[in-house]
Image (spheres, rainbow, N blue to C red):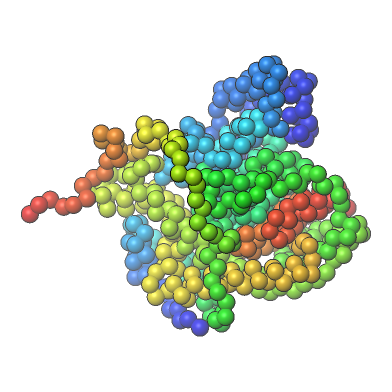
Amino acid sequence: MSIVATAESVRTKQTRAVVVADETLAAIEARDGDIHAFLHLDAESIRAQARGIDSQIDAGQHPGRLAGVPVAIKDNLCQRGVPTTCASKILEGWKPPYDATVITRLREAGAVLVGKTNLDEFAMGSSTENSAFGATKNPVDPSRVPGGSSGGSAAAVGADMVPVSLGSDTGGSIRQPAAFCGVVGLKPTYGTVSRYGLIAFASSLDQVGPFARSVDDAGVLFEVIAGHDPMDSTSLAISAPDVMTDIDGGVAGLRIGIIPELMDGSSDEVRARVVAAQDALREAGATLVSLPAPELLLGLAAYYLIAPAEASSNLARYDGVRYGNRVDGADVSAMMIATRTAGFGDEVKRRIMLGTYALSAGYYDAYYGQAQKVRTLIIETFHRIYQSCDLIVGATTPTTAFEFGSKTADPMSMYYSDIFTIPSNLAGHPAISVPFGTGEAGLPIGVQLLGPALSEPTLFRAAKFLETEVGR
Amino acid sequence: MSSTHPLDANDVIKVASLARLSLSDDEVERFTGQLARILDSAAEIAALDLGGLAPTAHPLALVNVLRDDVVRDSLDRDDVLSQAPSVNDNRFSVPKIIGDAP
């Protein structure tokens, strides 16, 4: 059932929000022991929220577009009074004193906030293996990773524990786990969804977005959370883009670019599904145009300087003074060193050190400065590409979900799984991953659609079309 | 073109100190290898001639955002302090910052 249908049933009392909540709790009880998608879940709070929705309906009020719809939340989004850890020991036990704007908007729409989902510590990783509280399993094959960093939110939807969830995407952290778990995932245009209350990793790249079982559900959730927020100074001064009105408009007449480099090095089974998607688009009346753009592959190296540089600054705030955990020391400096050394995991330390190095005197020009120029090059390359096409179709990830432990010893091999998703973050553009069949081992494969800033209505139209063609 | 040199253990010890992290000898060795490999891949862009391009720090053309100067609620002090590791007299409390007098 779509989330619109669920909300309608709840509003018309064909079902009750408390019944939906109990079904959700039963699904989580049945699956999450194996999957470990959730870091925090409070059954009483879920039931209390649902009772509140039902009372509003009984009183003749309209609780909102997501009345009674269960939504899981990545644990780097602040929810007042609810533990928010970023999957880091340094924040274990911390309860934010305020709601992120996306949480406020979900509450105002009548959604039921189910719980906080697992991630790579501070959203740094591509497998959830960097969580301080244990990895999440891929619901399709528990010997494999769910992807990351938003692996818990992807797995919770993939395992049918919740219909929709929120994640965050800095270099692919929504789209890559969506592809690995066989669900829809959107990285919106930078500035369309408020970052207020999203715990910062790399502020010029981070964006909150939806996971869903269907393109329609992702579109509705996106419309609910998007739109200007005065609490985020990088929020665009626009109302939420309307993606639902034309979502069934099809792809006839669209010009769709194929960037050979955005399939470079992908496995045969991934490539085969992307080609099948291209064929489907062409047969439906889209014009496909090949547009080589080798510059986009430079994004990976630029990203792994820019994101750590911003992270090294953002994570300086974890000093054991105002929130989170403290390890005592003889003086304030010793306390800060002991706190950060004990509180951060290896990947976070690696990125903080990498970023500190890239920004340090003598290396700034060679590393961070060059990476910023590559960022300009990538934006200009996209600008050139979008003179000739409306959207780009390609692979979300080079491979299907990999096995636990297969990339942990070599950070570069882990980073490589983001190579096709990173360029959109560097440019601030939207991109969506749609499940498009499976590979030989039955593992999900995602097709990625990329577009210029604020092209979400077109992206959703094309994504909806691919969803109907998934059987081909 | 800018120059870079291979990262060594002394560099790692220095950046760890700047970032307020303490590393064991084993960690210094392990992180040096891993960070050097990441920087190797960064060398491809460090070597590019991008002289004509301006750097991009942010995807949006940011301008100052101002709001009307009106009083509004801020976070509740007790809520905020309740989450701090150590509090004294409605203030965040830390170990001594300045050493003992001689």
A320 with respect to A261 (left or right): left
- In the depicted structure, whether residue B52 falls above or below residue A306: below
Displayed quadrant of residue A374: bottom right
Q: Which residue is most to the left? A: B102
- In the depicted structure, whether residue B48 falls above or below residue A290: below
Which one is nearer the viewer's eye here, A288 or A245?
Answer: A245
A362 with respect to B65 (left or right): left
For the point 52% across and 45% down, which residue is it? A231
Would you say residue A274 is visible in this rendering? yes
A404 with respect to B17 (left or right): right
Q: Which residue is most to the front? A: B69
For the point 39% across and 60% down, which residue is it? B27
Which one is nearer the viewer's eye here, A466 or A425?
Answer: A425
Residue A55 drawn at (x, y percent): 65, 18
Q: Quadrant of the N terminus of chain A?
A: top right
Which one is nearer the viewer's eye here, B26 or B15?
Answer: B15
For the point 78% across and 31% down, which residue is it? A5
- In the depicted structure, whether residue A35 falls above or below residue A50: below
Would you say residue A137 is visible in this rendering? no
Residue A135 drawn at (x, y percent): 56, 45
Residue B29 drawn at (x, y percent): 39, 65
Total numbered labels: 0
Residue B102 drawn at (x, y percent): 7, 54
For the point 85% across and 46% down, which residue is it? A248
